[in-house]
Image (tube, grey):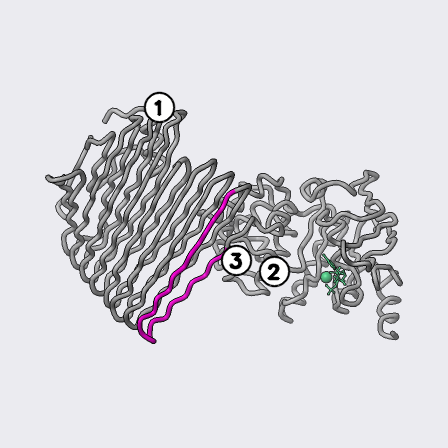
């Protein structure tokens, strides 16, 4: 249902192809991991899927519809959600408001708070805080993940969800992914990660290098491939 | 009180209700008081020699408020009003001012409100002032507030100064003299649009030992509007002063911010932060990725910023 066809991406003033003639059809559902060295193009790929960036060449297809030119809002409404590698701070917007927006608006604190609990935050302590400089990096990251969980879309993309999260929460986070997969067997969850502990719970792993897929397959196969290199 | 719909709209914008409040008040409509009440602890008296009020808050007053809204609905009315507040030792009071102009004619309507606060020892005040304008007329809606705050020992003042919308021109002056162990906190919120202009200047003098000031101005300038800020803090003793000027700029608007920090001794610690810029595109994208369209995302960010 989600497919990239010959997608290339480059930026002005830089001859480097950040993504180079990239083609891949995601499975209908399940957990798919994208891994690869720093700068290999993982975040760029996610941003192309969400519409934050537009390919210089090629097409992106969702449910047989060409969404290459669709805006972020349109894709969000078609059922794509994206957890940013670097969570965004917005002065004056509270954690409650952010997650309420993700849920479509008009929700009570109990409903909103349940998503904070999923990422190990106490709603009483966080709902009224602003998503600005007062929150720590790890707290921001967890709230970012909660905002995507709250959307409960057909496709969710998480860009390095484990980054900045402590060890205890890391295993809780792994369980969150297992749980959403169990509860929503029809959903596709794409996780960009460098962590073996995350990669091993997925159904399929893509390995990127210099904007191309150099290998993909089941975790057992890919993890031993990565270790041998 | 007989009020027109427009007058009610103004009162709702500047103080959330057009009803008479509990406690002391004075309602000024088109240059005249249409209702006034004092309480045992708060005296509200008209000045004899000029327009305005003397408001005396007795020592030890607790949990009381004074509401003194001003409404102008007569096109072309121009007034200067002086309100002086004498706040007794140990008093705690909330003062709700605010002014709105409805202008349906071709002449400018102007309200210059001068508010002076003489705050006694160990007293605490919260002052809320909202400004608002609307109406179909060509005449401008002009509001020029002057706020002077004199803090004696151990006292505290919190000022919330807000210009909601519709004010064509404003020159705002805020002056504070802060004594020993006193603190002043100012939160200014300003929105300008169309061809409006706003000038806001602060002169805060930290005179006493451990005097503190925290002045935060957040503003949004849209369309062709112009904003100018001059924030000056002087430290004359061991003190702490912080000012922050944060502006979102849109369309063809302009914003100019000039801070002045003047430390007269080495124990004066003064900080200024300023940031002017358009809405960050990551912020828009984040909210759009949650399903808002670009306009919804923009107004969400602006409303939050000005909250
Ligand atoms: N706007 C840009 N201008 C110039 N180069 C860019 C731009 N955006 C991305 N790049 C480059 O594209 C490459 C891929 O970046 P991307 O962020 O996708 O990497 P990544 O695989 O997510 O890396 P990491 O593991 O560090 O998050 C990098 O070399 C980066 O410097
Ligand atoms: Mg990345």
Tell us which disc is closer to us: 3 or 2: 3
**Foreground pick, B109 / B181:** B109
Q: Look at mark 1 in the image and give the residue it sits on.
A: B105
Q: Look at mark 3 in the image and give the residue it sits on.
A: A132
Mark 3–mark 2 distance (CA, rounded to whole Å): 14 Å
**Residue A211, percent across and down?**
83, 59
Read off the magenta span: B253-275
What is the total number of numbered labels drawn onto the structure image? 3
Check mark 1 vs ligand 1: CB closer than 8 Å? yes or no: no
Tell us which disc is closer to us: 1 or 2: 1
Q: Is residue B97 above or below residue B152?
A: above
Mark 1–mark 2 distance (CA, rounded to whole Å): 55 Å
Question: Image point 50% across, 39% down: which residue?
Answer: B224
Q: Do the CB atoms of the residues marked 3 and 1 lie less than 8 Å apart?
A: no
* Mark drawn on residue B267: none
**Dots 3 and 2 on the same chain:** yes
- Tell which subunit mark 2 falls on: A
Element at badge 1?
Answer: loop
Question: Dot 3: few (<14), some (14–19), or many (≥20) neighbours within 10 Å?
Answer: some
Q: Look at mark 2 in the image and give the residue it sits on.
A: A142
- Tell which subunit mark 3 falls on: A
Q: Earlier in the sequence, mark 3 or mark 2?
A: 3
Element at badge 3?
Answer: loop
**Residue A108, percent across and down?**
51, 45
- Tell which subunit mark 1 falls on: B
Question: Image point 23% across, 34% down: which residue?
Answer: B28
**Residue A165, percent across and down?**
63, 67
Quarter of the image that includes the C terminus of chain A: bottom right
Quadrant of the picture in which ligand 2 is shown? bottom right
Residue A171 occupies quadrant: bottom right
């Amino acid at each position: 249902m989600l497919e990239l066809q010959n997608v290339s991406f480059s930026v002005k003033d830089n001859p480097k192809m950040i993504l180079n003639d990239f083609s891949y059809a995601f499975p209908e559902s399940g957990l798919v991991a994208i891994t690869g060295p720093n700068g290999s193009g993982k975040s760029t790929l996610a941003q192309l899927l969400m519409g934050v960036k537009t390919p210089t060449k090629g097409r992106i297809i969702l449910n047989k519809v060409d969404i290459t030119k669709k805006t972020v809002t349109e894709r969000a409404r078609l059922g794509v959600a994206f957890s940013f590698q670097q969570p965004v701070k917005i002065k004056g917007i509270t954690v409650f408001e952010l997650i309420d927006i993700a849920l479509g608006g008009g929700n009570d604190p109990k409903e909103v708070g349940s998503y904070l609990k999923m990422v190990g935050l106490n709603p009483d302590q966080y709902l009224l805080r602003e998503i600005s400089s007062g929150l720590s990096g790890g707290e921001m990251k967890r709230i970012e993940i909660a905002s995507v969980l709250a959307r409960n879309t057909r496709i969710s993309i998480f860009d390095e969800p484990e980054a900045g999260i402590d060890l205890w929460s890391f295993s809780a986070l792994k369980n969150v992914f297992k749980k959403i997969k169990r509860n929503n067997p029809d959903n596709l969850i794409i996780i960009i990660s460098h962590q073996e502990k995350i990669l091993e719970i997925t159904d399929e792993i893509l390995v990127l290098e210099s904007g191309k897929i150099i290998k993909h397959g089941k975790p057992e196969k890919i993890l031993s491939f990565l270790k041998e290199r | 009180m007989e009020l027109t719909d427009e007058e009610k709209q103004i009162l709702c914008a500047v103080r959330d209700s057009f009803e008479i409040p509990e406690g002391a008040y004075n309602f000024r409509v088109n240059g005249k008081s249409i209702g006034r009440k004092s309480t045992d602890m708060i005296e509200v008296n008209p000045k004899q020699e000029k327009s305005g009020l003397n408001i005396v808050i007795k020592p030890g007053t607790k949990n009381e408020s004074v509401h003194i809204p001003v409404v102008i609905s007569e096109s072309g009315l121009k007034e200067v009003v002086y309100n002086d507040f004498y706040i007794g030792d140990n008093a705690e009071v909330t003062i709700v001012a605010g002014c709105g102009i409805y202008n349906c004619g071709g002449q400018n309507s102007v309200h210059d409100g001068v508010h002076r606060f003489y705050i006694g020892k160990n007293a605490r005040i919260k002052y809320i002032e909202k400004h608002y304008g609307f109406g179909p007329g060509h005449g401008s809606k002009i509001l020029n507030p002057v706020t002077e705050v004199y803090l004696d020992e151990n006292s505290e003042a919190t000022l919330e100064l807000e210009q909601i919308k519709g004010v064509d021109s404003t020159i705002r002056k805020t002056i504070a003299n802060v004594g020993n162990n006193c603190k002043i906190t100012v939160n200014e919120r300003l929105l300008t649009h169309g061809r409006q202009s706003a000038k806001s200047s602060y002169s805060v003098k930290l005179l006493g030992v451990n005097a503190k000031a925290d002045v935060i101005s957040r503003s949004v300038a849209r369309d062709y509007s112009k904003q100018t800020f001059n924030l000056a803090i002087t430290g004359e003793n061991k003190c702490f002063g912080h000012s922050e000027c944060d502006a979102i700029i849109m369309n063809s608007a302009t914003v100019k911010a000039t801070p002045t920090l003047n430390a007269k001794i080495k124990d004066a610690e003064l900080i200024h932060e300023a940031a002017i810029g358009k809405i960050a595109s990551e912020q828009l994208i984040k909210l759009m990725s949650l399903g808002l369209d670009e306009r919804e995302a923009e107004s969400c960010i602006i409303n939050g910023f000005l909250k």
